Image (cartoon, rainbow, N blue to C red):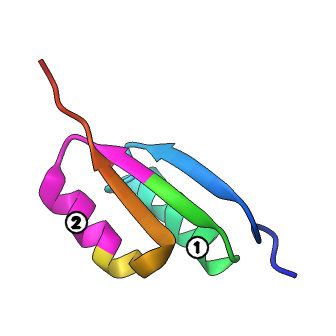
């Protein structure tokens, strides 16, 4: 059993930096992630990298 099996983690700012690094780690240890962020292009890139273990939700500002 992996550390994050059957877990879904929400990561704000998950399209780059520490958020994306955390998402990679969680996915590599069996979890699923929901990523939010302001940059839709980076979020889509993160989803492609992480595959079906990631759901992205772009935030709309103002």
Where is the N terminus found, in terms of image quarters? bottom right
Which mark is on residue 62? none
Residue 41: x, y in percent?
13, 60
- On the rendered structure, is 42 left or right of 16? left
Residue 12: x, y in percent?
43, 40
Please, what secondary structure does the residue beneath circle 2 have? helix
Q: Residue at x 62, y 79 (%)?
A: 28
Closest to the observer: 28 or 53?
53
Q: What separation in Å lies between label 2 and label 1 (alpha carbons)?
A: 16 Å
Please, what secondary structure does the residue beneath circle 1 have? helix
- On the rendered structure, is 29 left or right of 34? right
Residue 9 higher or lower than 30, as above or below: above
Q: Residue at x 29, y 78 (%)?
A: 48
Most common SS among magenta residues: helix
| Mark 1 crowd level (few <14, some 14–19, many ≥20, 10 Å Cα) | many
Q: If you read the primary sequence from the N terminus, does the residue marked by circle 2 or circle 1 appear first?
A: 1
Part of the protein shown in magenta? 35-47
The residue that disc 1 covers is 27
- On the rendered structure, is 42 left or right of 35? left
- On the rendered structure, is 43 left or right of 55? left
Which mark is on residue 44? 2
Query: Mark 2 and 1 residues: CB-CB less than 8 Å, in contact?
Result: no
Closest to the observer: 55 or 45?
55
Residue 24: x, y in percent?
52, 71
Q: Residue at x 54, y 46 (%)?
A: 10
Residue 15 higher or lower than 25, as above or below: above
Q: Residue at x 44, y 78 (%)?
A: 52
């Amino acid at each position: 059993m992996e550390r994050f099996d059957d877990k879904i983690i929400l990561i704000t700012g998950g399209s780059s930096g520490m958020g994306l690094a955390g998402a990679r780690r969680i996915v590599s240890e069996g979890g699923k992630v929901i990523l939010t962020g302001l940059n839709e292009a980076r979020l889509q890139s993160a989803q492609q990298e992480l595959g079906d273990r990631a759901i992205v939700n772009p935030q709309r500002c103002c």
